[in-house]
Image (cartoon, grey):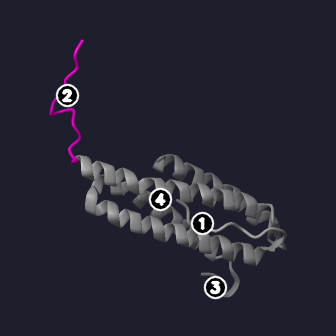
Amino acid sequence: MTHTTTAAQVPAMSAHVREETGNQLPATLVELLDLSLVGKQSRWSIVGPHFRPLHEQLDELVDSWHELADVVAESSRTAPVDRGAVHDELALAQIVQRVAEVAESTREEMDRLAELDVVSQDVPLGVVRQLEQQLWMIRSQIPNGRAA
């Protein structure tokens, strides 16, 4: 049996646009996976009066970052966390910095995708929206707004 491709089966975008679009999303995936690993490591390093709620919040954030990675499903600039005990305020500041960095680089990828394919831009747009909401929630816990 011979199979021929018809015009209706071919994606509406050119091969170049498909390739460039596909090249934008893997970096976001890797960064989200790195962010989830940093979050997992951080939750066991926290010490201080806010250990329990921050430990639980990081569990929720890590789950969210895994879900976002699944959505992107397609390297990394996320810095690792320090080893040893980390005071809760410092842990919050470090998480804020890393989430902000991933949100910013994902925003840049979103802008590049907008030039290539507006439909594909929707994936990083959803990632940025959720990361920025998480940033707002995390930053609200930092005394005197000392985090990035």
Query: Which residue is labeled 2 in the image?
Result: 5
**Up-down relation of residue 131 to residue 67 (above or below):** below
Q: Which of marks 3 and 4 is nearer the N terminus?
A: 4
Q: Please report contact status of discs 4 and 1: CB closer than 8 Å, yes or no.
A: no
Query: Which residue is labeled 1 in the image?
Result: 78
Q: How far apart are marks 4 and 1 (CA)?
A: 16 Å
Residue 9 in magenta? yes
Quarter of the figure with the C terminus: bottom right
Circle 4 sits in a helix, a strand or a loop, which is it? helix
Q: How far apart are marks 2 and 1 (CA)?
A: 42 Å
Residue 110 in magenta? no
Question: Viewed as shown, does residue 6 lie left or right of 61?
Answer: left
- Amino acid type at circle 4 is Val
Q: Which of marks 2 and 1 is nearer the N terminus?
A: 2
Mark drawn on residue 145: 3
Query: Which residue is labeled 4 in the image?
Result: 127
Q: Can residue 57 be seen in this view?
A: yes
Q: Please report contact status of discs 3 and 2: CB closer than 8 Å, yes or no.
A: no
- Amino acid type at circle 1 is Thr
Question: Viewed as shown, does residue 119 lie left or right of 127?
Answer: left
Label 1, residues with CA under 10 Å away: few <14, some 14-19, many ≥20: some
- Amino acid type at circle 2 is Thr
User: Residue placed at 25% from the left, 46% from the top?
Assistant: 15
Q: How far apart are marks 3 and 4 (CA)?
A: 24 Å
- Amino acid type at circle 3 is Gly
What stretch of residues is rendered in magenta? 1-14
